[in-house]
Amino acid sequence: MGTERSFVDYVTEVAGLGSRLTHKKMFGEYALYLDGKVVAFACDNSLFIKPSKAVVTLAPDLPQGPPYPGAKDYPIADELLDDPEALRRLIEATAALMPLAKAKKAPAAKRAS
């Protein structure tokens, strides 16, 4: 189905993290980044938080499901859209546990033959 941009805009507004929370469209869905770290995915207009100890500690009762066919289960944080403070805490705690994205290597220059 693909996630609507308006859903992603709503999630970023509710989270209240300003320009720290960004997103990138991927295959009709979105990855959400806090301070450059992937913390969640928006798939089929639902919010899937990256599995981590933060979820176990802050939101252990979130339902689980795959964000796309063939994926492992992720916590589904749709209910936290009604609790901006809880959503913000979960996103920040998740980001604290995630590694920074690896820098892309520049393409090697072609050698003259």
Image (cartoon, grey):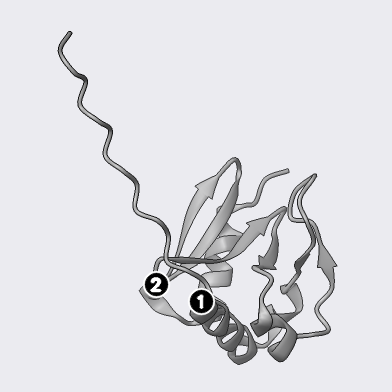
Residues at marks 2 and 1 touching, judged by CB atoms closer than 8 Å: yes
Residue 2, by quadrant, is top right
User: Which tag, 2 or 1, sits closer to the chain's start?
Assistant: 2
Q: Residue at x 49, y 81 (%)?
A: 96
Q: Amino acid at mark 2?
A: Asp
Residue 88 as seen in the image, left or right of residue 110: right
Residue 68 as seen in the image, left or right of residue 63: left
Q: Residues within 10 Å of mark 1 (few under 14, many from 20)?
A: many
Along the viewing direction, whichever of 85 and 60 lies nearer the viewer: 60
Name the disc covering residue 95, or none: 1
Helix, strand or loop at disc 1? helix
Name the disc covering residue 35, or none: 2
Name the disc covering residue 72, or none: none
Q: Residue at x 56, y 84 (%)?
A: 93
Q: Residue at x 63, y 59 (%)?
A: 42
The residues tagged by marks 2 and 1 sit, at their Cα atoms, a distance apart of 8 Å
